[in-house]
Amino acid sequence: MMRTQSLSRAYQTAVSNGRHEIVADAPTDKGGGGTGCGAHELLEASLAVCVNMAVRMCAAEQSIPLEHMSTEVRLQRPDPDRVVFEFSLALSGPLSIEQRLALEKAAHTCPVRQTLSQRLEFKAVK
């Protein structure tokens, strides 16, 4: 579970899972201070982190010599009824074509991607 608390600056928010804390904020053009990631950026970050971990876990499990990787995610809204998460991987190391394909396939299996691919519902709990 994630919990948030308002901080003293307008829209600045502490985000905690009970063990770790980060600060989120609205961008300056929305009245915030721009002192932390925005809400949509945190959504992009969640997917990017999950893809990154899934690929690295696959490399470790299959003894693929992945030396470094980075992931970029961008949320796009091409029309009002559609959201597209675009992502790219940068893989480095002495990787064969087959190994690269296995790592790219692993990127599609991350749990956050699977969650975001499902029908979502929102329910306020009292």
Image: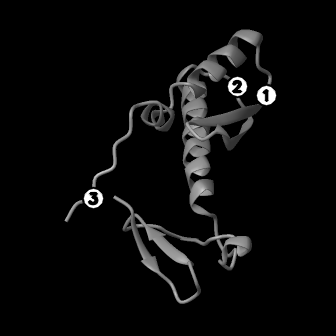
Label 1, label 2: how far apart the Cα atoms are: 6 Å
Label 2, label 3: how far apart the Cα atoms are: 46 Å
Disc on res. 124: 3
Q: Position of residue 118 (x, y in %)?
A: 41, 31
Identity of the amino acid at label 3? Ala
Q: Which residue is mark 2?
A: 65
Q: Is residue 44 above or below residue 37?
A: above
Q: Position of residue 67 (x, y in %)?
A: 74, 34
Q: Is residue 89 above or below residue 18?
A: above
Identity of the amino acid at label 1? Gly
* N-terminal label among 1 and 2: 2
Q: For the N terminus, give its image quadrant.
A: bottom left
Quadrant housing residue 102: top right
Q: Is residue 32 above or below residue 121?
A: below
* N-terminal label among 2 and 3: 2
Q: Nearer the viewer, residue 22 or 35?
A: 35
Q: Are marks 1 and 2 in contact (CB under 8 Å)?
A: yes
Secondary element at tag 2? loop
Quadrant housing residue 29: bottom right
Label 3, label 1: how far apart the Cα atoms are: 46 Å
Identity of the residue drawn at 68% across and 79% down: 33
Identity of the amino acid at label 2? Pro
Q: Which residue is mark 1?
A: 93
Identity of the residue drawn at 62% across and 43% down: 48
